[in-house]
Image (cartoon, grey):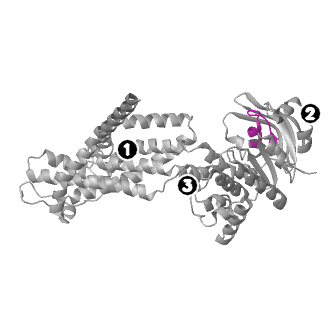
Amino acid sequence: MVSRKLVDRIFTVSVTLLALVAVLPIFHIIYYITIKGLPVVLEGGVNFFTQIPPSPIRVNELGGIAPAIAGTLFMTAVATVIAVPIAVLASVFSAEYPNHNLTKIVRATSRSLLEVPTIVIGIVVFALLVMPFGRFTAIAGAVALAIVMIPYVYTYTELALLSVPRTYIEAAYGIGMKRAQVIYMVTMGVARRGIVRGITIAIAKAMGETAPLLFTAFGARNMIFGGPLEPSDAITLMIYVFIQSPFEHWHRIAWGAAFLLLVLYLTLFLISRRLVGEVRV
Amino acid sequence: MSYAIEMENLRVSIFEKEILKGINLKVPEGTITALMGPSGSGKTTLLRVVNRLIDLIEGVKVSGTVKVFGKSIMDMDVYDVRRMSSMVFQMPNPFPHMSIYDNVVIGARINGVIKSKKEMDELAKWALEKAMLWDEVKGRLKDPPWRLSGGQQQRLCLARALALKPRLLLLDEPTANIDPVNTLKIEEALRNIRKEEGITIFMVTHMPQQAIRLADYTVMMYDGKVVEGGPTEEIAINPKHEVTKRFLRGEV
């Protein structure tokens, strides 16, 4: 009896320890970014959100990362508006006609798109939307981000729709609902948590992408936001450039930007959890 | 006598497997008629032909004639068929993302017949009273349905079906997953619905006792065919077929 209890103890302790080891890197990242980034944001104050970054020679200035914030918000928003309707409609089709040939094609395409390195997506959009017009634009960046988002939204939404128990769908048809009503009022309603989770993860993914923006939005940080048809900065792009530079104060700004990105993530996930009520089936 | 349901030589197969093998059946209007038989005899399939929920199944073939209140359901608009004959399922399945209130009135809302909030409230109250649930939920109509017990959820489903003001109520083993107290409540509700509203009730059960307690007429099914049918007393006291006798003894 004693040995059985002992085995149980050893098991519990080791599982707990392994779980801690698994989450440790996440907490380490959060901790490290906060330690390095929070003081920069505090020092910069409001200016950090409203000013453009200082030139490399003004080593004593912190300036702000307004162009990067504006660019990230604009491009992510436009990408969401493009990606969500396409991906959600495609997943509704897939869930309604799971054995249709088109479904098989869409599913295979989406799965491969998830595996494609995002820099490749950047190059494709460069060829399609940058080369012909001869300029880098925020819109091209947004389109590249939308392509990154689509397979995420599609996969999560399809999964959520397919996991709606059949019995609710039967009940909906049973009270005389038409097909579109069943999809919109019941299937999507029951699956709303999963759908929103997919959209949230896709938005987070888009906000964190650098590679698709390198040859599309390119980056521009001498003014806050030039418009959709001008090159645009993004938080990730700016971090990528600044952290590689030899300038101490640019490194510090990059850490502050990383912290801000982290805060944006947390806000995004908290809002999406709050916004959509739980559905218990 | 006029009939709520008339079936002639109804055959249903799903991917070449024959489920119903030539059903002839009449359900008199204004009665409670029970359909009993062992698992796999085709009771649920037969019930789903009546409101054409069977259309949703892939690879299904239906032949023969089925009339509901004298009209062939194949010639009617499928949505009219379903509104006229609403259904309560084996597992309680109130829509989990809607409130108790919305669950009841959703049918009326999508049909667009009722416009005013007051009428909608009255409909909800009426349906919940008929389902004998009103007293338990009147103070918390905005709650989600998972706050209710399984038996209450099933009565909510009954209210949802009633709120369509159907002429025919189809029940697929409505008490199979419900405790005895709730079972008796549902049975009482059904008796009252038949008596006060004149709604015909056609229910599947695999409990002979339930058919005896509740039904005016009973139909026995076995292996995709109707074995016998008639007034419940006759079937219960003097079953003609061996399989009915064995079913009543609880052997099949």
Location of residue A49 by image quarter: bottom left
Distance of label 3 from label 2 (alpha carbons): 48 Å
Q: Are marks 1 and 2 on the same chain?
A: no
Q: Is residue A93 left or right of residue B152?
A: left
Task: Say if A127 sits above or below B155 in the image.
Answer: above
Residue B195, image x, y percentages: 84, 59
Looking at the image, which is closer to me, A131 or A77? Answer: A77
Q: Are marks 3 and 2 on the same chain?
A: yes
Q: Which mark is residue A147?
A: 1
Callout 2, which amino acid?
Lys
Looking at the image, which is closer to me, A38 or A192? Answer: A38
Q: Is residue A248 left or right of residue A169?
A: left
Callout 3, which amino acid?
His
Q: Is residue B203 left or right of residue A229?
A: right
Part of the protein shown in magenta: B35-47
Could one spot residue A222 in this view of the protein?
Answer: no
Q: Which mark is residue B202?
A: none
Residue B62, image x, y percentages: 77, 36
Q: Is A227 covered by the magenta stretch? A: no
Chain ID, mark 2: B
- Pointer 2 residue: B240
Callout 1, which amino acid?
Ile
Q: Nearer the viewer, mark 1 or mark 3?
A: 3
For disc 1, the neighbor class at 10 Å (few under 14, some 14 to 19, many from 20) is many
Residue A175, image x, y percentages: 69, 53
Q: Are marks 1 and 3 on the same chain?
A: no
Distance of label 1 from label 3 (alpha carbons): 31 Å
Task: Say if A136 sits above or below B133 in the image.
Answer: above
